[in-house]
Structure formats: structure tokens, C-alpha cells
Image (cartoon, rainbow, N blue to C red):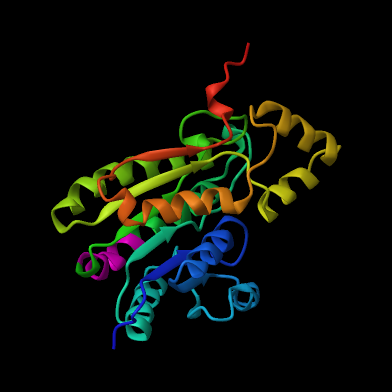
Amino acid sequence: MASDRPVVVVTGGARGIGLGIAQLFAENGYAVVIADRDSARGKIAAKELPVEAAVRFVCADIAQEAAVQALMAETAEAFGRLDVLCNNAGIETYRAADAVSSEEWDATQSTNVRGAFLCIKYAYPHLAKARGSVVNIASVQSFANEPQAAAYAASKAALLGMTRAMAIDFAPAHVRVNAICPGAVDTPMMDGFLRQQPDPEAARSRLCAAIPLGRLAVPRDVAEVALFLSSSKASYITGASFLVDGGLLARLAL
């Protein structure tokens, strides 16, 4: 029996941006499927959502096709519908381009690009029935880059190309596909990056100083845009990408 509320699948939903998206959608009446390869953290994340929300955690590594097929099948079986897919799962690889191993390159593309593709491919039949939408979480690094980010930047640029192409393919079925490009977001992934710096607090200060709005984003900043793009208010928006970077890319480095 189909759920009486819209259903969203959030990949990489156990922490950071993904968890922020899952929480906001739950607060706005969605049934939420959190998909993540970290089973322990995923179960904790599901309990952090509002108690009245319909929430399901599915352990899934989106780099594995069978896992993606199982994720979408379990969603359909549990809720009878799928209205929104948020492709948030991703891995960062920071290493000088000439030092990136083939294995690191393949792992990054396998999750960030191929995994997103597989999720959309297997979600599409359900999204078409609901005239639903896809929100891909890309990055400012789709447009401009810092050093040692070749593998990650390539994956996020590819995600924008895929967003445009799929928006065209799926428009006849009224399935919209858009992307969000966050800048620096205060997440566990960011914490890990900062801890690797000689002076983490100084590194955080430099990041904030580079952003015109003067602060790091929080996951909810990204989640609000994802919710808008999934709503009827964005019914004429598809194939688009939205910067959520506090003005980072607007400033010339002079």
C-alpha cells in the first residue's frame, strides 16, 4: 500500500549534509529512507529524526549495483512510492594529481559518479510514476578548484553534466533533475580535513575569511535548497545547478 506522504531517499544520509537533508524532509512531512554504508551510524541517524516521522535505514554501498537495486526495491516495498532521490553520498580524495593511484581514482568515480547514476537509473521507474525529482549534491569544485583535488573535482564536474543530460531525458516523464553545489560546509568530513592541518583553528579562520558571508555553511543551508527543488515551487526548474557557497565563487582572487 502506498504511503500517504511523499517519500525521499537520501544516500549518504547518516551524517553531515545527508543527515541535514533527511532531518529537514522529515520535519516537512516526508517519509525518509536513509541509505548509507555505515550501518552503525545509519541506525543512530534514523533515531535522530523527529519521532513522528516515518523513517527507514537501509545499509547500502551505492558503488555496488546490486545494493542500489535492493535499496530501491526495499523503498518501494516499504512505502509503495518514491517521490525524491537525493544523491548525496560521496567520497573526497585529496592528493596531487600525479600521486593519485588508479585505485583511488576508480573508487572516487565509482561512488561519486557511477553510484549516483545507478541510484537514478533504478529510482527512475518509481519517480516517473510520482512525477518526482532528483537532487544531486555536487560541489563548488565542479567550477573552480583548490590544489590536490583532481579526482574529486572530476567526479563533481561529471555529476553536473549528468544532471543536465538526465534532465533532458526525463523531462517527458515530468521527472526533474537538478544539482546543488555547496562550498565549505561544517560537517564531520570538514572536521577531518581541518584536523589534518598544522593549525586546525587557523585553517578554519582562513576558510571563513575567504567566504564573503564570513562563515562555513551548515547542513541545513544545503537542505533548504534541496527541499525547495523537490517542491511544487520549483516545478519549472530542471537541469539547473545552484551554488550554496556563501559567495565563495563570486569573489575575485585579487
Q: Is residue 12 visible?
A: no
Q: Quadrant of the C terminus?
A: top right
The answer to which of 8 and 146 lies nearer the viewer is 8
The relative height of residue 57 versus residue 158 in the rendered view (above or below) is: below
- Residue ranking furthest to the left: 172
**In the rendering, at what x and y percent does residue 36 appear?**
53, 69
On screen, 73 above or below 12? below
Q: Position of residue 150 (x, y in %)?
A: 53, 35
Q: Nearer the viewer, residue 130 or 193?
A: 130
Residue at 32% over, 67% down: 83
**Residue 246 x/y as whole percent:** 59, 34
Query: Looking at the figure, which quarter contains the N terminus?
Result: bottom left
In this view, 42 is above or below 230: below
Relative side of 195 to 135, left or right: right
The one of 93 and 185 positioned closer to us in this rendering: 185
Give yes or no for residue 127 being in the magenta stretch. yes
- Identify the residue at image location x=49%, y=80%: 56
Percent coordinates x, y for residue 163 in the rendering: 32, 46
Q: Seen in the image, is 123 located left or right of residue 19?
A: left
Q: Nearer the viewer, residue 132 or 191?
A: 132
Q: Main SS type for the magenta part?
A: helix
Q: Residue furthest bottom?
A: 1
Q: Residue at x 18, y 50 (%)?
A: 169
Please tell me whether residue 121 belongs to the stretch shown in magenta: yes
Q: Quadrant of residue 41?
A: bottom right
Where is 183 relative to 82, above or below?
above
Residue stretch in magenta: 119-128
